[in-house]
Image (spheres, rainbow, N blue to C red):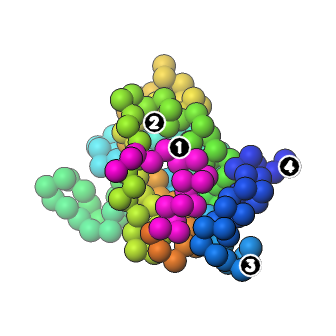
């Protein structure tokens, strides 16, 4: 299997830039991407299970990996959700699949977002992980618009080995994430 484009860029360019900027002595000290989690929450799936099946199929097409059904931890009467009922699906991507997905996300999907002004640079947590949401799955070219049952959003979390926000921000900026200017 051919090495993903983003992984090649990480090995050849990003590591050297990060070593220069943060003064790492060793290549292994440079932060790296650990995993990417794609999560879709569909509360309406309790009434219509076909929505969940369609979402699973589409997320599997987008990510190239089978989804896991997420279940409700608590019963919420106002939303008609029982404990243990299926309310969404998620995928955890690692290694080559993760780099392929991020490459397609950055190069193809994000530029297709209407009125896009950049990703928020404030969405990092203390330990250097980045989370953001997409409003619809239609921005991915793998999704056939004619077969879409319902549009839904998804949460994407990029987990890094960075120790703090500035390291993680620089890693993702060098990887090609289009952050908004402050």
Secondary structure category for the residue under label 2: helix
Q: Which residue is labeled 3 in the image?
A: 26
Q: Which residue is labeled 2 in the image?
A: 137
Question: Which region is colored magenta?
Answer: 166-182
Label 3 Cα neighbours within 10 Å, binned few <14 / some 14-19 / many ≥20: few
Separation (CA) of disc 2 from disc 1: 8 Å
Q: Position of residue 48 (x, y in %)?
A: 34, 40
Secondary structure category for the residue under label 3: loop
Task: Kindly check if marks 2 and 1 are in contact, taking CB atoms under 8 A apart as contact.
Answer: yes
Which label's residue is closer to the chain start, 4 or 1? 4
User: Residue 98, located in which quarter of the rendered image?
Assistant: bottom right
Label 4 Cα neighbours within 10 Å, binned few <14 / some 14-19 / many ≥20: few
Name the residue rendered at 40%, 74% in the picture.
126
Which label was assigned to residue 1? Answer: 4
User: Does residue 37 appear to the left or right of 113 in the view shown?
Assistant: right
Residue toward you, 174 or 47: 174
Which label's residue is closer to the chain start, 3 or 2? 3
Secondary structure category for the residue under label 1: helix
Query: Does residue 16 sit above or below 143 in this rendering?
Result: below
Separation (CA) of disc 4 from disc 1: 23 Å
Which label's residue is closer to the chain start, 3 or 4? 4
């Amino acid at each position: 299997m051919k090495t993903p484009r983003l992984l090649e860029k990480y090995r050849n360019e990003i590591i050297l830039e990060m070593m220069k900027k943060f003064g790492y002595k060793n290549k292994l000290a440079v932060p790296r991407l650990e995993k990417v989690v794609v999560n879709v929450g569909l509360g309406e799936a309790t009434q219509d299970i076909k929505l969940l099946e369609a979402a699973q199929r589409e997320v599997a097409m987008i990510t190239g990996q089978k989804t896991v059904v997420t279940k409700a931890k608590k019963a919420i009467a106002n939303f008609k959700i029982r404990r243990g009922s299926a309310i969404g699906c998620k995928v955890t991507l690692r290694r080559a699949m993760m780099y392929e997905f991020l490459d397609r996300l950055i190069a193809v999907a994000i530029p297709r977002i209407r009125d896009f002004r950049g990703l928020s640079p404030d969405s990092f947590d203390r330990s250097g992980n980045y989370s953001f949401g997409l409003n619809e799955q239609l921005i991915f070219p793998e999704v056939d618009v004619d077969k879409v049952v319902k549009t839904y959003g998804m949460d994407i979390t990029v987990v890094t080995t960075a120790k703090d926000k500035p390291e993680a921000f620089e890693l993702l900026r060098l990887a090609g994430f289009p952050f908004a200017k402050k």
